[in-house]
């Protein structure tokens, strides 16, 4: 690494300061990103039409799959770049970054085209009713067909910058898009009277501006970074290493989207109001997830770098500090959501029936946050060490093996309210698997340390 300050962050800076240096900007950018995700629901909710809120909620899981592609190439490529830097093989980072960028571009473009061609079957799959189909169609067109490519590229470029220690630049790009979206939403929705279409257009424009910012950062860093976005460095030599780690995060996001699609589809049998209430709850639930993801993405480069450098003592200290921060945060969030749920729901929509259902949903959903944070921390630690298969097992268990079947079981046994308990049940069931895989990896490292000393 050419910058002494970056080398200090990874190798010598006190652990709390190093984690906060990378995690705080990342957490802030994640919160701002969450705010612009909430902005669509909030401003559409101010119209007072549950059908419009339901339409945004229906499309959101399909839109969220774009994050899977961003994680596939961004998290996968970023993890590998951090480990290459730790192993003093930084010159290879330009090939990894080029592969990640053009891979993300190709996949997101294909997804946008497929969404355009098969839009009607997709809307039917998502559970759109005759009353919500028109709104959902317009929202999907703008946020995925037109805005899908910049959404994926923004996530990918932000992760790549963060992997080399440029957390500030990565966060600024995400915050720029988020703040712009919040500003454009009321302009397009109310001033131009575009309603749901205005919310979608604001999201597409904001993500495009973020990508332009990131491209400008890469241009400014030219000569001072090991990474490159030039096509001449594109090679498939690192595809397996990038995709093996990135696929864990990508599959996690995809399975999460499938879970949301499943619960929305099942809830739609109870009417459009429960769909609107659940959609708001899932958006509110984005806040603890955003902070947890920011913390995890902040410590990932530190864990990956020190793992590759075989500085296991510092790596473990980074993990312990991150766990402590995550534990305190999750306890505060559970208490806040439980007691303030009526005010939170009323903030988003002024509909007595929707508020009443949403309060019950939110109080159940918040109970899953502590165990969810623990599973996040373990999964991202494994990804940082390049253990893509172990991370994939955890994500698959949480969101596929346990979650989706439980949705059908709980809906059959208890009904609509039963489905809201599924997240807590799935996260709790996977905790023993998480600890087992994590402890096994730590034991391998201890054995390696003892062998080296001998």
Image: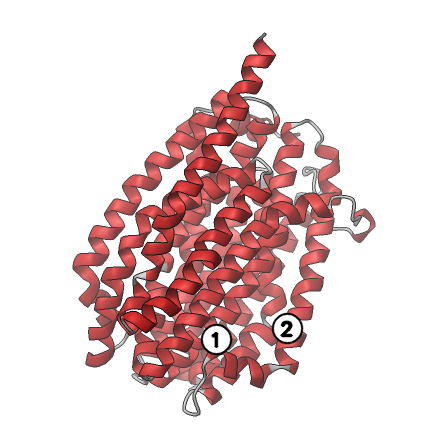
Label annotation for residue 112: 2
Q: Residue at horizontal 52%, vertical 38%?
A: 382
Q: How far from the left and from the top, in percent, is residue 200?
A: 49, 76
Circle nearer the N terminus (2, 1): 1
The vertical placement of 144 against 329, above or below, is below
Residue lying farthest left? 339
- Identify the image quadrant of residue 383: top right
Task: For marks 2 and 1, give the CA distance.
Answer: 14 Å
| Drawn side of residue 366 relative to residue 443, left or right | left
Q: Residue at horizontal 56%, vertical 27%?
A: 306
Name the element at disc 1: helix
The vertical placement of 16 against 417, above or below, is above
Q: Nearer the viewer, residue 301 or 186?
A: 301
Q: Nearer the viewer, residue 214 or 231?
A: 231
Label annotation for residue 446: none
Q: Residue at horizontal 28%, vertical 56%?
A: 366
The vertical placement of 445 against 364, above or below, is above
The vertical placement of 60 against 15, above or below, is below
Residue lying farthest top? 454
Q: How far from the left and from the top, in percent, is residue 47?
A: 32, 83
Q: What residue is shown with label 1?
A: 59
Q: Residue at horizontal 52%, vertical 33%?
A: 302
- Identify the image quadrant of residue 311: top right
Name the element at disc 2: helix
Label 1 packing within 10 angstroms: few (<14), some (14-19), many (20+): many
């Amino acid at each position: 690494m050419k910058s002494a300050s970056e080398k200090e962050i990874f190798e010598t800076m006190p652990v709390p300061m190093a984690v906060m240096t990378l995690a705080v900007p990342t957490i802030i950018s994640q919160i701002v990103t969450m705010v612009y995700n909430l902005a669509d629901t909030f401003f559409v909710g101010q119209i007072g039409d549950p059908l419009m809120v339901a339409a945004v909620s229906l499309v959101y899981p399909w839109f969220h799959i774009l994050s899977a592609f961003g994680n596939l190439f961004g998290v996968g490529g970023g993890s590998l770049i951090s480990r290459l830097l730790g192993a003093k093989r930084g010159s290879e980072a330009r090939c990894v970054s080029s592969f990640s960028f053009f891979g993300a571009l190709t996949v997101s473009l294909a997804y946008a085209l497929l969404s355009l061609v098969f839009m009607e079957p997709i809307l039917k799959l998502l559970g759109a009713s005759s009353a919500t189909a028109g709104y959902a169609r317009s929202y999907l067109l703008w946020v995925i067909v037109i805005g899908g490519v910049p959404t994926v590229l923004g996530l990918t470029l932000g992760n790549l910058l963060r992997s080399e220690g440029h957390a500030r630049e990565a966060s600024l790009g995400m915050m720029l898009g988020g703040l712009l979206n919040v500003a454009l939403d009321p302009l397009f929705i109310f001033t131009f009277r575009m309603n749901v279409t205005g919310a979608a257009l604001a999201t597409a424009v904001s993500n495009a501006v973020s990508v332009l910012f990131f491209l400008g950062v890469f241009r400014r860093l030219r000569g001072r970074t090991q990474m490159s976005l030039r096509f001449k460095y594109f090679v498939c030599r690192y595809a397996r290493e990038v995709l093996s780690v990135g696929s864990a995060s990508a599959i996690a996001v995809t399975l999460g989207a499938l879970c949301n699609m499943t619960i929305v589809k099942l809830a739609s049998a109870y009417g459009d109001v429960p769909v609107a209430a659940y959609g708001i709850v899932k958006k509110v639930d984005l806040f603890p997830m955003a902070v947890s993801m920011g913390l995890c993405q902040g410590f990932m480069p530190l864990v990956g770098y020190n793992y590759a450098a075989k500085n296991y003592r510092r790596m473990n200290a980074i993990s312990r500090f991150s766990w402590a921060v995550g534990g305190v945060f999750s306890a505060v969030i559970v208490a806040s959501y439980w007691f303030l749920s009526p005010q939170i729901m009323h903030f988003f929509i002024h509909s007595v029936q929707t508020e009443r259902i949403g309060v019950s949903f939110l109080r159940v959903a918040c109970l899953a946050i502590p165990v969810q944070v623990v599973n996040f921390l373990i999964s991202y630690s494994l990804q940082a060490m390049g253990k893509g298969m172990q991370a994939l097992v955890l994500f698959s268990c949480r969101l596929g093996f346990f979650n989706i079947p439980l949705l059908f079981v709980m809906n059959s046994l208890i009904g609509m309210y039963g489905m809201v308990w599924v997240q807590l049940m799935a996260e709790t069931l996977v905790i023993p698997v998480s600890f087992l895989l994590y402890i096994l990896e730590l034991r391998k490292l201890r054995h390696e340390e003892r062998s080296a000393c001998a």
